[in-house]
Amino acid sequence: MDGPLRVLVADDQTAVREGLVTLLETFPGTTVVGAAANGDAVLEMVAADPPDVVLMDLRMPVRDGVSTTARLRAEHPAVKVVVLTTYADDSSVREALRAGALGFLTKDAGRADIARALAAAASGQSVMDAEVQRRLLAGMSEPAEPPVRSAADGVLSGREVEVLRLVAGGLSNREIAGRLFIGEATVKSHINRIFAKIGVRDRAQAVRYAFRHGLTGE
């Protein structure tokens, strides 16, 4: 991307919020454009000066992270959200995923994990803490729609299912190409066909589709 990665921090705990700002300011190519203590403040700051990514706490007063994420998705779709959650089994994680969050980290995530999640989200890719993902998948016993797992379902081919799983795992086109031993142009063609078949516009929507249909295992 052109220019620095612009990040807005949202957390109601002053010590955590200020610590995150201090940490992010040490990341090369990253600029912290603001810090908010609640969702309403996030919306005001984004309206005034949209960042690339919001690093979002889920549990905040006035307006929580889930409803704030949903509003951002509706009003500022170019702004991506990476969720920070205290507990990996926080039930709000599923709601945040549906609302449009791309990244999910626990608050004990390391510097490298945070940097990777922010960069991935800015590129429209999903990154999820392994423990968050494990607990989320374990709790998803009621998919909103019937599972779509193989070419026999008539929606996605076997290769397209494979590509979608890797997209949901946060891999870039280049990484998918390397994993499947195919060209990046072929990966792009697969992704375009997947988008058309499942009726989504971008990777974030494709990731949500994959979770709803149980297509997140490799």
Image (cartoon, rainbow, N blue to C red):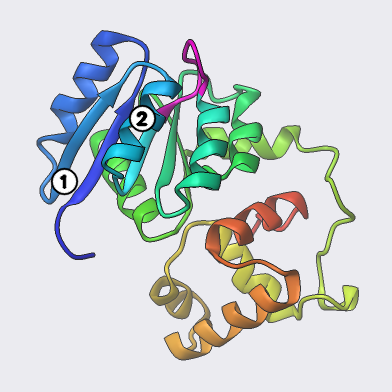
Residue 67: in sight, yes or no? yes
Which residue in the protein does label 2 denote?
A: 44
Residue 162 percent across, percent down from the top left: 65, 72
- Left/right of residue 152 with respect to residue 24 in the rendered view: right
Of 87 and 8, the residue lying toward us: 8
Mark 1 is on which residue type?
Thr
Distance between mark 2 and mark 1 Cα atoms: 21 Å
Q: Mark 2 vs mark 1: which is more N-terminal? A: 1
SS at mark 1 in the image: strand
| Quadrant of the rendering where the N terminus is positioned | bottom left
**What residue do we see at 83% from left, 45% from top?**
143
Which residue in the protein does label 1 denote?
A: 30
For the residue carrying disc 1, how many other residues have a C-alpha within 10 Å: few (<14), some (14-19), or many (20+)? some
- Left/right of residue 175 with respect to residue 94 in the rendered view: left
Residue 183: in sight, yes or no? no
For the residue carrying disc 2, how many other residues have a C-alpha within 10 Å: few (<14), some (14-19), or many (20+)? few
Mark 2 is on which residue type?
Glu
Magenta residues (range): 56-64
Number of numbered discs? 2
**182 over 36 or under it: above or below:** below
Q: Residue 139 lies in what quarter of the image?
A: top right
Residue 4 percent across, percent down from the top left: 15, 53
